Amino acid sequence: GGTRGSEGYGEATIGSVQKIAATLQHLRRLVLQDLADVGWSMIWDLGPWSSFLDIGSGYGKVVLHINALVRMRAAVGYECVNSRHEIGTRAKQLLEAELALKSKLEAADAQRDSEIAESTVQGEGGVGDGAVEGAPNEATDAAVHGTVNGTVN
């Protein structure tokens, strides 16, 4: 929407979001059983089967944090102030890019570890190319810094 609004308003802290997530993950035990002991099903607890909706989500911090903590089916924020929505969308894009890079680096590490283990089993006794493990090289520099031949990807 085109609603205009102040950028200065209440934001939830990471600690608050962690408390909310913990409460929602154990909602049956912490809240519902005290209301009525009727055998609440697991579906009431926030988990991988759940969806989370934050209306008036601001910059999207709660949605991003809850989704990272709980890893549910869907986490959605709705914000009608354009500037807040744009900042939240950009934060989500940056987080997704960071997670994708982390995943690629972890896969490269696993591949390297597999190759080292394989060469050790075959009697080569180590990396096999004379490289010092953990020493920087062009391939790791390009992966970490997103550059190839000096060009930013």
Image (cartoon, rainbow, N blue to C red):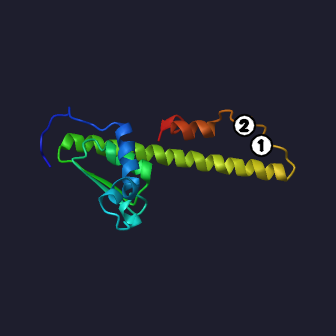
Q: Residue furthest left?
A: 3
Say which element carries label 2: loop
In front here: 92 or 35? Answer: 35
Q: CA distance from mark 2 to mark 1?
A: 7 Å
Q: Are marks 2 and 1 in contact (CB under 8 Å)?
A: yes
Q: Does residue 56 appear to the left or right of 146 in the view shown?
A: left
- Judge from the rendering whether residue 45 lies leftward or rightward of residue 103; answer left or right: left
Q: Residues within 10 Å of mark 1 (few under 14, many from 20)?
A: some
Residue drawn at x 35%, y 39% as measured from the top left? 16
The residue under label 1 is which amino acid type?
A: Val
Q: Nearer the viewer, residue 61 or 104?
A: 61
Amino acid residing under circle 2: Glu
In the picture, measured across the screen, residue 60 lies left or right of residue 21, that is: left
Residue 66 visible, this orientation: yes
Q: Position of residue 73 (x, y in %)?
A: 39, 60
Residue, disc 2: 133
Residue 74 image offset from top left, x and y in percent: 36, 58
At 42% from the left and 58% from the top, the residue drawn is 47
Residue 53, percent from left and from top: 28, 55
Residue 110 position in % (x across, y down): 65, 50
Give the crowd class for mark 2: few <14, some 14-19, many >=20 residues within 10 Å: few
Q: Which mark is residue 127?
A: 1
